[in-house]
Amino acid sequence: MSVKIALAGNPNCGKTTLFNALTGSNQFVGNWPGVTVEKKEGRLKGNKDVVIMDLPGIYSLSPYTLEEVVARNYLINERPDAIINIVDGTNIERNLYLSTQLIELGIPVLMAVNMMDIVEKSGDKINISKLSERLGCEVTTISALKGTGIMKAAERAVALANAKKAAPKVHKFAVKVENVLTAVEDKLGSDIPEEQKRFFAVKLLEKDDKIGEQMKKVPDVSAEIEMLEKEMDDDTESIITNERYVYISSIIGECYTKAGKETLTVSDKIDKIVTNRWLALPIFAVVMIIVYAVSVTTVGTWATDWANDGVFGDGWSLFGLEIPGIPVLVEGALEAIGCADWLMGLILDGIVAGVGAVLGFVPQMLVLFIFLAFLEACGYMARVAFIMDRIFRKFGLSGKSFIPMLIGSGCGVPGVMASRTIENDRDRKMTIMTTTFVPCGAKLPIIALIAGALFGGAWWVAPSAYFVGIAAIICSGIILKKTKMFAGDPAPFVMELPAYHMPTAGNVLRSMWERGWSFMKKAGTIILLSTIVLWFLMSFGWMDGSFGMLEAEELDYSILAALGGVFAPLFAPLGWGDWKMAVAAITGLIAKENVVGTIGILFGVAEVAEDGAEIWEQLAASMSAVAAYSFLVFNLLCAPCFAAMGAIKREMNNIKWFWFAIGYQTVLAYAVSLCVYQIGMLCSAGAFGIGTVVAFLLVIGFIYLLFRPYKESTTLKVDMKKAAMGIK
Amino acid sequence: MSTLKEIPCGKTVKVTKLTGEGPVRRRIMDMGITKGVEVFVRKVAPLGDPVEVTVRGYELSLRKADAEMIQVE
């Protein structure tokens, strides 16, 4: 007989640490059905029959945030055998607020008061037996970080689960409220078990708009609500919340003794400096420079170069020992067995290159993930949101979006992956969609090519590319937050600033590994598949009347070139209807720096420098400056490379959102390039045509989308039935 | 009667009422800002918004626009 135990608690209370300590490596990480909230399940160390479910960190069981809805759906529909309610002992008052709601669910609750070591060190005292008596649930003390008391807590929870006895209801609100609650409970149908009645009664009184979907029959309680609101001169939602806190204050008064005078804790002292009005921004800049310098430019570049040019390249040396790269080894092996050319091409340029494209990002990403995990666990990430909120919220992003964008200027793949630190679903999706607009390192050669070939290396081309990227982010933010896709869910920014503390190496490494692994698994497949498909399109074609495999220089004859010819007219309104440029843009999907190489090959130069200096003249002769700039803008904004698309797919975790993101980026790129070319031509050559009209219409539409009024939504748009079914 | 938005840093005030409605208000209450509780305005973010307050023994940040919903004395 297996026992199911749910871990519930506030964010930052040490829940993840406890979960890791209880389950060790017996974990399964997934997602709650239909939503992007992470779902973690594990088996108790030493007792495989006990399944532990790590619920998302929540402050309340209100119907307003995705995490809360997911957690309460699980608790109501799945009904775990017991709940371990983990409570931060150093912040017990607010933590108990959730506890009072959990106890009402009629599921046995064991309260684990965490961080007892810190509480004791500060000299504060918590009267555990009194707390247990007043709350009506069992209480134990633990230190998840040090591992003290955790196995005992788990054993007690299992015992509670087996006893199947829900906590007796001891907490009482004011008499007036209790009377109304009893009246509502009496109205509930028989489909609701006795021990859950209080929960449903409270939710009905609070006018909770999601609870009806969990009930067969929803009684009409408007008379009770009206009576109570009149009598207490407040709305029921406030009345209930007030009652809970009044009740908690009374418990705290009896059970918690503070050690004399309030002194500044170490965390307070750190915070005084770190978020100081004058020092905060410089400190923030320094932290960001360190993160960027280490994970993108120095260690990150070594790691990427080692992975791409060494392990998946010609080879690398370890203490003077020459170790050949994997492609070299594979090639040698294939030649030795006399493998056919096409198969060798498939294996080397398709599969090995594809795997390399996936794994090449991993070392750099792991470096970045260590930083992110550290910043999150130590409490600084919340301060990042605090410091940057003012700027980013204007265009529907979170203050935490800063980090993905910053990293995105190095490489969009880890940039997109860094968006995981944003809790709010809407902010996160918006960040994922816009991060790749920032010109990444691989787009720099394209900028250099266009600037060199057509603008005589003008200084303003590169800054203008960044300007276009940033403008795209800002405008997209404003436009998207008004669309149906985004305007749906509310995003309150009422955020706890947790106390600073030193994270454990174990937790940081585990978080790093989980994210890295999920990239390899989820993003890897799409990257690998698309690399193989493009390899096929590029290396096969018709030459001299027969279909066959081509040399790299014969790209003109490939299937891809033929496809380029088909697609080229599509790009004619953008000014670069030449099939060569279309093909170059498509090969940019493998990696953006390929664009320059492809143009080189198509203009008859097999090997070009990074900025394509050899073909500047030819390119300048083949297109106008306006067309070239339009080409540049398109490549900056359109769908990113496959690796970044893989990351987007992983982070969106939803195929519909993935296509929405890619589609949006490409449509935006097309529209902006069209406007650049058509209006540019009008200004430079006085050319006026149907394209110019379309461009002006697009500009007007764009301005409308930017400035149209909209209203923030106040309800969470989640199909509860679907979510509930999915969980079962 | 004033709102939390107008209170300067370093002052402690008592909440008298929460105006407005919907998720932000519920969230503010869930986080412990309810009638009668004492709120200490700790600091303002470097760019002038949001503000950081101490309530029920922990640190909370909220935007000035939301702080306007909290009436204090």
Image (spheres, helix red, strand yellow):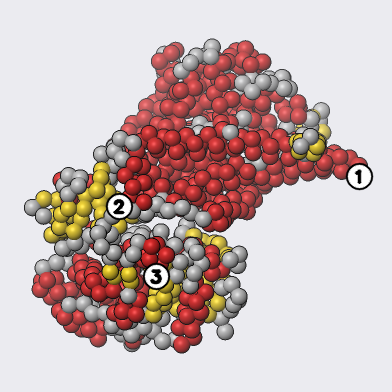
Q: Earlier in the sequence, mark 3 or mark 1?
A: 3
**Residue at the disc numbered 3:** A113
Name of the residue lying farthest toward the left: B1
| Crowd around label 1: few <14 · some 14–19 · many ≥20 (10 Å) | few
Q: Which marked residue is nearer to the observer: mark 3 or mark 1?
A: 3
- A455 sits to left or right of A422: right
Q: Are marks 3 and 2 in contact (CB under 8 Å)?
A: no
Q: Amino acid at mark 1?
A: Ile
What's the amino acid at mark 3?
Val
Residue A41's image quarter? bottom right
Q: Nearer the viewer, residue B59 or A424?
A: B59
Q: Nearer the viewer, mark 3 or mark 2?
A: 2
Where residue A33 sits in the image (x, y, percent)? 49, 64
Query: Is residue A721 in view from this perspective?
Result: no
N-terminal of the two: label 3 or label 2?
3
Question: Regarding mark 1 in the picture, which secondary structure is present there?
Answer: loop
List the residue tagged with mark 1.
A337
Q: Residues within 10 Å of mark 3 (few under 14, many from 20)?
A: many
Q: Secondary structure at mark 3?
A: strand
- Is disc 2 in the same subunit as disc 1? yes
Question: What residue does disc 2 label?
Answer: A264
